[in-house]
Amino acid sequence: MHLPPAPWPPRDELRLKRVLGYINWKRSRERITDFKTLALLVDDMHSQRPDHVAVTGDIVNLALKSEFAAARAWLNSLGAPRDVSFVPGNHDAYVREALKILNSAFVPWTSDAQADEKAAQYPFLRVRGEVAVIGVSSGVPTGLFMATGRIGAAQIGRLRAILADCRTRGLIRVVLVHHAPVPWQSPMRRLVDAGEMSQALAQEGAELVLHGHHHKRMVNFIASPNTQTEGGKIPVVGAPAGSILLKDEKHRAAYHLVHLARRGDKVAVNVRARGPAGVEGEIAELAPVLKGAPR
C-alpha cells in the first residue's frame, strides 16, 4: 500500500537509508501515489463483501513509529482483525531497529491468540472454514539501495510442516508472502531463498500463493504433485501497489478478488482484478487475472 505521506524522519529515527528513502519518495513516488484511489479501492472491495482480506506487505515506506500507528488504523478500516491477514514486506522492515515495533504492531492480523500475544509468529496459520491462510514473512532489513527479501531455513521448515498438516486435514492452502518465490527476479529486489521456498511449495503443495513487491499484476506457476489445483500447478499471483496511479494498467493500482471452488477432489482458482479503468475514473472490472472457477 505504501501508505502516504512518508514524513521526514524525526531526529531519534534518522538513518541514512531512511534519508535516501525519503528523497526517493519526494523525487518520484509522491507524484504517482494517490491516496484517494486507495480509498476508492477499499470502498469498492467492501461492496464486494469478501470473506477475508489479505495484505501482502509494504504497508509503510520508511518504517517510522508514526507510520506504524497510521498503518494499524488503516488495517482496522478494512474490517475486524479476524477477517484481515497481514504479512510484512521490505519497507515494513526497512531498518533493523524497526523490527521490534513491526513484530508487535500487527499481532491482531497475524494470530488468533489472545490479545496479550507479544509478537507476530511466522509462518502463521489462520483457518477460515475450508481455507488455511498461511502467512510467511520475507521482510528483512537490507543495505542501501537493496530491496531483497529472505525467509530463512527455520521458517521454511515450519512452513513445510504446516502445508503437510493442512493437506492431511483437507484444507485449501493459501500462502501469503511479500516477495515472489520465483528465481528470475532482479538481484536487488529478489527473494534470496526463492529456490528453497519454491521447492518447499512444490514438494508439500499449496493451492495459491499471493504476493506483492513488484507493483504489477503478474501470474506464475509452480508444478506440484501435492497441490489440489486443476492442472497440478500452484498459481503464484502478484498484485500491484494499491496506491500507485499510472497509465499502464498492469502497474496501476488495483486489488484482486479471489474465488476458490471445489470441483470433486480438485480446487479451481479464479482471480479477478478491480481498479480504475484509467488514471481517473470509477473502480471497475479489469481484465481477468486467472480463470479457473465460476464467479
Image (cartoon, grey):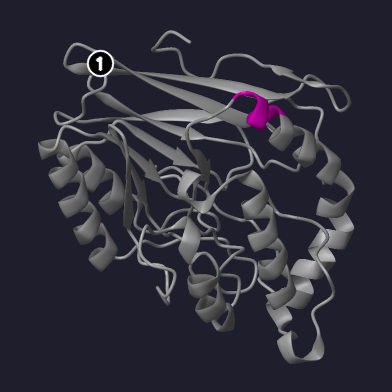
Figure check: 291 above or below 9: above
Q: What is the magenta range?
A: 44-48
Q: Main secondary structure of the magenta part?
A: helix
Q: Is residue 62 visible?
A: no
Which residue corresponds to the image point at 78% horizontal and 19% vertical from the top-left?
Answer: 277
Residue of label 1:
231
Residue density around tag 1, few if under 14, some if 14–19, many if 20 or more, within 10 Å: few
Was residue 12 drawn as part of the magenta stretch in this picture? no
Give the amino acid at mark 1: Gly
**Residue at the farthest left position:** 168
Instruction: Give percent across and percent down for residue 13.
Output: 72, 86
Q: Position of residue 79 (x, y in %)?
A: 59, 45
Which of 64 and 197 lies nearest the eye of the viewer?
A: 64
Residue 281 visible at all: yes
Residue placed most toward the observer, 270 or 140: 270
Which of these two is toward me, 148 or 167? 167
The percent coordinates of residue 47 (x first, y second) are 66, 25
In the image, what residue occupies the spot 65% across and 30% down?
45
Tell me residue 135's x, y (percent). Answer: 38, 52
Q: Would residue 164 appear left or right of 134 to someone viewing this image? A: left
